[in-house]
Amino acid sequence: MKTHDQIDILMFYTVLYDTGVSGDLFLCTVFISLLSTFHILNTTLSFIVQTCVEQSFQKGMENEKRHSYIVNT
């Protein structure tokens, strides 16, 4: 049986799966807030979250470059 919080996160993930960068970034934010709520944000978990945020940012930059290339050609 899933707890209410687990179901909420699963719904967030399902809804945001197709939204791309903002979805990834939002998911990271939700993840961070959950971890800080339970006071279990140790170095390993913060590294995972940092990596997640960096990858989201890189994806956003790549999408922006691709978009501006398409617009300019």
Image (tube, grey):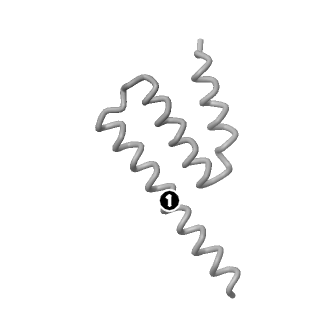
Mark 1 — residue?
A: 57
Q: Is residue 27 above or below residue 40?
A: below
Q: Looking at the picture, how far across and down is residue 46, in whole percent?
A: 36, 40
Q: Quadrant of the C terminus?
A: bottom right
Q: Is residue 72 above or below residue 48?
A: below
Image point (50%, 59%), residue name: 57
Image point (60%, 70%), residue name: 64
Question: In the image, is 42 to the left or to the right of 33?
Answer: left
The kind of residue on which mark 1 rests is: Phe
Q: Looking at the picture, how far across and down is residue 17, in whole percent?
A: 64, 45
Outermost residue toward the bottom? 73
Q: Looking at the picture, how far across and down is residue 6, in whole percent?
A: 58, 23
Image point (36%, 36%), residue name: 45
Q: Is residue 38 above or below residue 22?
A: above
Outermost residue toward the left? 43
Q: Looking at the picture, how far across and down is residue 30, in whole percent?
A: 54, 36
Q: Quadrant of the N terminus?
A: top right
Query: What is the total number of numbered labels drawn onto the structure image?
Result: 1
